[in-house]
Image (spheres, rainbow, N blue to C red):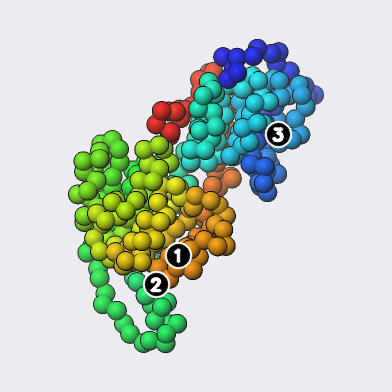
């Protein structure tokens, strides 16, 4: 059934050689990458016609059953009455899932090995930044202090990852290969060779107690919103550091500020924020123990993502079966 249960006739677009089916691309209103996405998607699936939403005719809006989206405006989705499912070009779909939670619309998130590799690279980069005490050396440079700091072997640092999905597993393996002692926590039990795995709420305290660097890669759900708060941070050893490459709303900003000011945490690397772009008045910009990144840890690769999306849609055209969809109860 279409997501709003209105049955309308399908209007294919005829060409000289075949009948092409229109697939709209919907992006956030302020997006500057719509044209690039349409071009990449079109190159990956020449048998389809990829059109930006604002260029759709009324007949096309009435016919499409699948759309490709990047944080779309929910009001635009409502203008596609036959829509059955949407393919997101992002791995994180918390906002989209919330927008369509009360409808029958199915959501497919992007699962791209290249994205996992990119995230693993970012996690390793910024873990090494903390491990080799770059923030301290940068501070010494400003103060013109010539002082070598004691070296700690990687195997004597414990890096713990919150979230052991595709991104978390790739990150954990990259850290393990770099010599770190690696732990990982997930809501359900998982096993990765060489990684000390924890699962369920009862085991989280034990993992946090041994953590030197905590990396958050959790999806944003009702259960994870505000998870990293004062009581959570207090379970980390004094001097631990935080890397958040997940979603800003998972961290309670005021509690994080307190933990930094009280020197319980030594540093926080933040790539995501509740409000983005981060307002110029935000405390994170100026705090000496915070590194601010502009949501750049793992950008989606348009080329590889478009090929994955094309494969999902081709299988749907041939079999009528949807790829794995987001569980709206879990939020991912």
Please say if the residues under marks 2 and 1 sit with CB atoms less than 8 Å apart: yes
Which numbered marker is on residue 53? 3
Question: Quick check: can you spot residue 109?
Answer: yes
Residue 142: % across, % down: 45, 82
Question: Quick check: can you spot residue 169?
Answer: no
The residue pinned by badge 1 equals: 291
**Quarter of the image that includes the C terminus:** top left
Residue 193: % across, % down: 24, 45
Which numbered marker is on residue 201? none
Looking at the image, which residue is at 39% across and 31% down?
330
Residue 44: % across, % down: 62, 37
- Mark sitting earlier along the chain (2/1): 2
The residue pinned by badge 2 equals: 135
Asked whether, in this view, residue 24 is left or right of residue 95, the answer is right
Q: Nearer the viewer, mark 1 or mark 3?
A: 1
- Mark sitting earlier along the chain (2/3): 3
Looking at the image, which residue is at 36% across and 61% down?
258
């Amino acid at each position: 059934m279409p997501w709003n249960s209105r049955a309308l006739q399908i209007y294919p677009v005829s060409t000289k050689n075949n009948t092409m089916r229109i697939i709209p691309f919907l992006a956030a209103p302020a997006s500057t990458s719509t044209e690039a996405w349409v071009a990449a998607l079109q190159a990956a699936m020449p048998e389809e016609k990829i059109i930006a939403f604002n260029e759709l005719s009324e007949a096309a809006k009435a016919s499409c059953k699948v759309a490709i989206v990047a944080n779309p405006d929910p009001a635009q989705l409502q203008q596609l009455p036959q829509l059955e499912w949407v393919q997101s070009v992002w791995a994180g779909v918390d906002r989209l899932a919330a927008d369509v939670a009360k409808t029958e619309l199915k959501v497919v998130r992007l699962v791209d090995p290249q994205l996992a590799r990119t995230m693993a690279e970012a996690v390793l980069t910024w873990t090494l930044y903390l491990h080799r005490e770059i923030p301290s050396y940068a501070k010494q440079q400003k103060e013109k202090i010539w002082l070598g700091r004691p070296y700690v072997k990687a195997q004597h640092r414990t890096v713990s990852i919150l979230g052991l999905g595709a991104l978390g597993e790739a990150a954990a393996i990259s850290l393990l290969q770099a010599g770190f002692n690696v732990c990982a926590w997930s809501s359900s039990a998982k096993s990765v060779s060489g990684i000390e795995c924890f699962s369920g709420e009862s085991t989280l305290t034990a993992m946090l107690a041994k953590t030197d660097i905590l990396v958050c890669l959790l999806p944003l759900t009702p259960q994870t919103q505000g998870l990293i708060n004062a009581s959570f941070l207090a379970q980390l050893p004094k001097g631990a550091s935080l890397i958040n490459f997940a979603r800003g709303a998972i961290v309670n900003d005021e509690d994080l500020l307190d933990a930094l000011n009280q020197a319980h945490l030594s540093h926080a690397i933040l790539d995501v924020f509740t409000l983005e772009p981060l307002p110029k008045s935000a405390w994170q910009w100026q705090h000496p123990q915070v590194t601010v990144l502009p949501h750049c840890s793992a950008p989606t690769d348009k080329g590889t993502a478009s090929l994955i999306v094309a494969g999902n849609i081709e299988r749907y055209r041939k079999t009528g079966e949807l790829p794995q969809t987001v569980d709206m109860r879990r939020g991912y």
